[in-house]
Amino acid sequence: MPTIRAATPKDIDSLVVLIDGYRQFYRQPSDLEGARHFLARRFERDDAHLLIALDESDAAIGFVQLFPVPATTELAMRWILNDLFVSPQARRQGIGSELLKAARQLAQDHGVPKLMLRTQVDNVTAQSRYQALGWQRDEAFYTYLLSV
């Protein structure tokens, strides 16, 4: 099993490749420098919780990133599990599930009552994993996007 821990600014070099791979999975062009800048901003602003998965040789093989947002209806914070990625060579080993479990534990440790995520409609592999771990698909709300 991987080691999963909170990422630090010292992990940026390892995370850049994973962030870039994640973006390419979602059909975005490779942008290593953009990924580096994005990560540096997260650490500077301290506006996200980022967990990193490491293999037995301490190589970065996955990450999960959560963003806190206020939930007025619940009068509490809600965390959006915005990003989850496991490098292709490390897939099918339970690492994604371990990252999801670690994210849940981190939220519990911070007193966060609810996690939320979105995934593409055709990403059935991820959907089955989420459901197996107790996530429930929202049938009450639609998501709308507006480019500005």
Image (cartoon, rainbow, N blue to C red):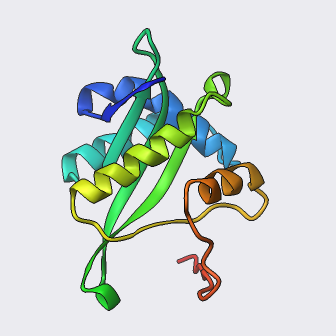
* Total numbered badges shown on the rendered structure: 0
Q: Quadrant of residue 22?
A: top right
Left or right: where does residue 8 sit relative to residue 88? left
Q: Quick check: 75 above or below 59?
A: below
Q: Quadrant of residue 118?
A: bottom right
Q: Residue at x 32, y 27 (%)?
A: 11
- The answer to which image quadrant residue 66 occupies is bottom left
What's the residue at 75%, 65% (across, down)? 121
Q: Position of residue 114 (x, y in %)?
A: 38, 70
**Residue sitting at the far top:** 57
With 132 as the anchor, is 72 left or right in this view? left
Question: Residue visible at 60% across and 88% down?
Answer: 140
Looking at the image, is 80 positioned above or below residue 126? below
Residue 10 position, x and y percent, is 26, 25
Residue 24, compared with residue 118, is above or below; it is above
| In-image side of 126 versus 94 (left or right) | right
